[in-house]
Image: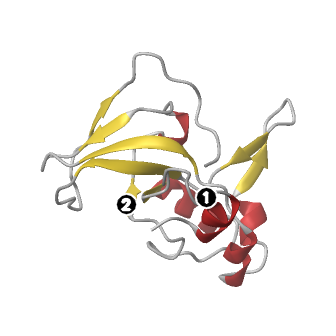
Amino acid sequence: MKHRSRVAKDPTAPNLRQVHLLHAELLDELAGKGFAVAPGELGENILMRGLDLLGLPEGAQLVFPSGARIRLTGLRNPCNQINGHTPGLMNAMLDRAANGHLIRKGGVMGIVLVGGDVQAGDEVVVVMPEHGRPLMPV
């Protein structure tokens, strides 16, 4: 299923938002700011720890022990609906770099290249693209 706002803009565009992956460290950071957010409450399909998801390039592939494979397509752009969980949460998921650029911390989006089971505790192999560019919002 495509995200409704994306379909409204262009119903023929490919669905680059099949899977939402989130770094568990964000939940820790939010807890430190007073936000109680449990796993799954931000709509993530896969919660990961110890992998710099936001630092991976577009096209990086995550390979799971089952053979499941996800290709990263871009950043999740947190929207105002997140404030429905807790007022102010959306702004807590955004930051500014020293140069003023917006940093989106809401996880990454990907597409399924190969289906398979994904289990808690799975060790993931990252396959880097030959020429990757930084993730942009999708």
Above or below residue 42? Residue 104 is: above
Residue 11 in the figure: left or right of residue 57:
right
The one nearer the camera, 5 or 67, is 5
**Of callouts 1 and 2, which one flags the residue occurring earlier in the amino acid sequence?**
1
The label nearer to you, 1 versus 2, is 2
The one nearer the camera, 61 or 83, is 61
Residue 1 image position (x, y, % from top left): 44, 68
Residue 54 image position (x, y, % from top left): 55, 41
Residue 96 in the figure: left or right of residue 47:
right
Secondary element at image label 2: strand
Disc 1: CA contacts within 10 A as few (<14), some (14-19) or many (>=20)? few
**Quadrant location of residue 93?**
bottom right
> In the displayed image of the protein, which residue is found farthest to the right?
100
> In the displayed image of the protein, which residue is found farthest to the left?
66
Q: Name the mark on residue 46.
A: 2
The residue identified by callout 1 is: 29
